[in-house]
Structures are given as C-alpha cells and as structure tokens.
Image (cartoon, helix red, strand yellow):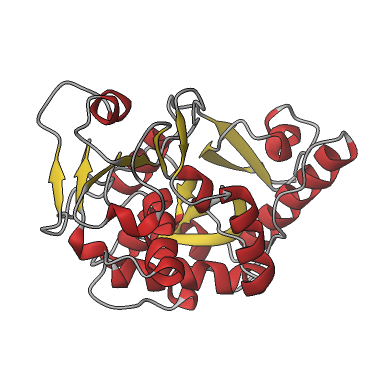
Amino acid sequence: MTDPLVLRTSVGKHAHVQPLRDGRVRSERVSLEFRDYEPLPKAFRTMVRGDELDVSEMAVVTHLLAHHYGKPITGIAIPLWSRLPHTNLVSPADSSIAGPLDLQGSKVGVRAYAQTSGVWVRGVLQSEYGVDLNSIIWLTMEDAHLEEYDDPAIAVRNQSSSGLRQLMRAGELSAIMGEREVDPSGIRSVIPEAETAAKAWIARTGIYPINHILTVRTPILEAHPWLAQELMEMFDEARRIAEADGAAAPPAYGLEANRRSLQLAFDFSAQQLITPRVYDVSELFHPI
C-alpha cells in the first residue's frame, strides 16, 4: 500500500469539520496535516500569497480575486462558514439611521472592501433596498488578501489608531459591518427586524449566502484526479458525524447545490467594482 498523500491544511474549528480534526474521519489515501492560524483569515492570505498550504478554507471573494489574478487555486463547493448579511450591518442604538436608505451620503466602516461579508451586505443593500452604494464612503481598516488588488475610489483607508466600533461610537461612522463576532451591546441592526428580513429573503430567493468554501492548489488536483472526490467524501462524513452529535447542519455540499449562491456573490463583486467582469462559478470550482 502506498503512503497517503499528505496535505498541509487549514480550516476553522467548526463543529462540522471537528471529526476530521480529531481523527474520527480518516482516509487511506489522504492525510490532512492541520495548521491553525489566528485569526482564521490569516490562512486565506497565506494560501493566496505563498505556498505554505495545500488545502485551505477560503473566503468566497478572496477565492474570486485569486482566480482573477491567476493564482493556481481551485474551489470545492463545501460551505464551511456562512452568516446572514442583513444582521451584520449595525449602527449605534441611539442612531438617527432608521433604515438602509439613510446610509446614503454617509461613511460606513468595514474591515476590508473586498471582505466577503461586506460584499454580501452591500449587495443586499443595493438589490433589496435601492441603496446607491456609490453615494457612501467605505472606510476600510486593511487591504485585501490579494496584494495585487486595489480598492475602488469610494473606499478610503482608516488613518487613525481607532477600531471600527470606536469610530462608530465617536460619530465618525454611521454604521459598520464585517465583524466576525458581533457584540450586541449598544448597537442595533440598520435593517429593521434583520433576522426576519434575512430569512424571508432566503425563502423568497432560495439562496443561502455562503462566506467560506474549501480551496485546493490546482497542480495537486491535476496530479491526483481522485482527490476532489476523496475530500468531498471526507468532509461529508465529518458533517454526518457532527450532525449526529447535535451540531447545526451547514448548507448542502456540492457545486450544483451552491451554484446560485456563489454566482450571486460573484455578480455582486462585479457590481461593486471588485472584479472588472462577472466570473462564472464553473471557472473557479471543481465540478463535483
């Protein structure tokens, strides 16, 4: 028997992948050598800027930009992390902002303009609430994971030492978004009844917004044509075990189950000047 293919791997500590991390799910063909980065987005940057990882969880828009700039990385449609965009845009509890349209002409903060959470939030603001995104100044805290990428003119970099919350409390920002863990104290959602609105949007469109998927270095997939199927089966088994243990079920795995969601994220990215054209999902993902 040949030795298993060892893959340097970084994925988040999600309940539905824990059986892979703790060894309950194994493969005779593949050995996942886990490497942790804190916070997790450091793994995305490592994957697209160097060769220290073979397999990595990846933000959807970062994967899109990696493809745009010719990085040899292929996606596998395994949703690893998601969030409701409607609930992630917040303003101070005592703010005069009554709804999304009140953001026009103001300044809104986000960690990075090309952050996937921001793309989903802005896409919803524009498509569902008629917000003119170009009327807003988008204050960013850092650059994109792709060093080749430059923000559009409507995005400006924070020059102070203050964080997003501090700037919003000081009145410098009307709202902020993109916080991975949203502290509810002193804030409220800009979109009224945000969770209800999000669930209604999902029910109406049939689209569940996906933030993170799995990526693999393309040369490895080309050298081992069986690998994508093996990884899908490993992650799927881990999900089944986790769900049997009581973990919340993630979205369904597989390209066709997630095509419309991924395509909408790519459509929003082009509308928001992140890419110069709309990319088709099939260009970036393995067909499995």
Whether residue 58 is situated above or below residue 93 in the rendered picture? below
Residue found farthest to the right: 244
Q: Quadrant of residue 224?
A: bottom right
Whether residue 217 is situated above or below residue 259 in the rendered picture? above
Residue 104 rendering spot, x and y as whole percentages? 25, 57
Residue 130 rendering spot, x and y as whole percentages? 37, 70
Residue for point 43% across, 27% down = 39
Can residue 212 be seen here?
A: no
Q: Quadrant of the C terminus?
A: bottom right
Residue for point 22% across, 25% down = 170
- Left or right position of 142 against 8: left
Residue 82 rendering spot, x and y as whole percentages? 58, 49
Can residue 219 be seen here?
A: yes
Q: Quadrant of residue 26?
A: top right
- Left or right position of 208 against 162: right
* Total tally of numbered discs in the picture: 0
Residue for point 59% across, 56% down = 198
- Left or right position of 226 against 158: right
Residue for point 34% across, 60% down = 101
Viewer-nearest residue: 96 or 227:
96
Whether residue 120 is situated above or below residue 189 in the rendered picture? below
Q: Quadrant of residue 199?
A: bottom right
